Image (tube, helix red, strand yellow):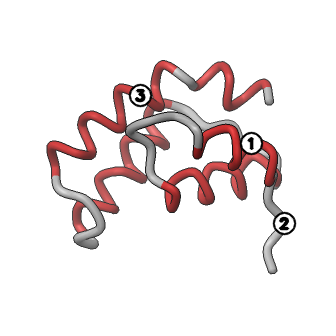
Amino acid sequence: MRARNFELEAALNTINGTSRYTNMVIATAREKGKIVTEDWLRRHLLQNVEDGLVDYDEALKMNEIYTKKLSFINNF
């Protein structure tokens, strides 16, 4: 199993409008020392749209929620 920050993932899962899959990806990236930026987040969400995991409107709403939480995510 990949290392991931389970505490961060659990905290993100409590926020309405977030995706459990994206929360897991963010937690894994942070555990590996990556910084989540607006650009990284936008590319991840657009890839989810292309893969059919979410529609474009959902991705826009999630982008707004996650963007507001970037400092929380990166300082967790």
- Location of mark 2 (residue): 3
Position of residue 45 relative to residue 66, above or below, is below
Residue 70 image offset from top left, x and y in percent: 58, 25
**Amino acid type shown at disc 2:** Ala
Mark 1 or mark 3: name the one nearer the start of the chain.
1
Check contact, mark 1 vs mark 2: CB within 8 A. no
**Amino acid type shown at disc 1:** Leu
* Residue occupying image coordinates x 84% and y 66%: 3
| Mark 1: few/some/many CA within 10 Å (<14, 14-19, 20+) | many
Q: CA distance from mark 3 to mark 2?
A: 25 Å
Residue 30 image offset from top left, x and y in percent: 75, 46
Mark 1 or mark 2: name the one nearer the start of the chain.
2
Position of residue 49 relative to residue 52, above or below, is above
Residue 27 image offset from top left, x and y in percent: 70, 51
* Residue occupying image coordinates x 27% and y 45%: 59
Q: Which one is nearer the viewer's eye here, 38 or 55? A: 55
Could you tell me which secondary element the residue under label 2 belongs to?
Answer: loop
* Residue occupying image coordinates x 79% and y 73%: 2
Label annotation for residue 8: 1
Q: Which one is nearer the viewer's eye here, 35 or 4? A: 4
Q: Nearer the viewer, mark 3 or mark 2?
A: 3
Q: Residue at the far bottom: name it.
A: 1
- Location of mark 3 (residue): 65
Q: CA distance from mark 1 to mark 2?
A: 12 Å
| Mark 3: few/some/many CA within 10 Å (<14, 14-19, 20+) | some
Identify the image quadrant of residue 4.
bottom right
Position of residue 42 relative to residue 46, above or below, is above
Could you tell me which secondary element the residue under label 3 belongs to?
Answer: helix
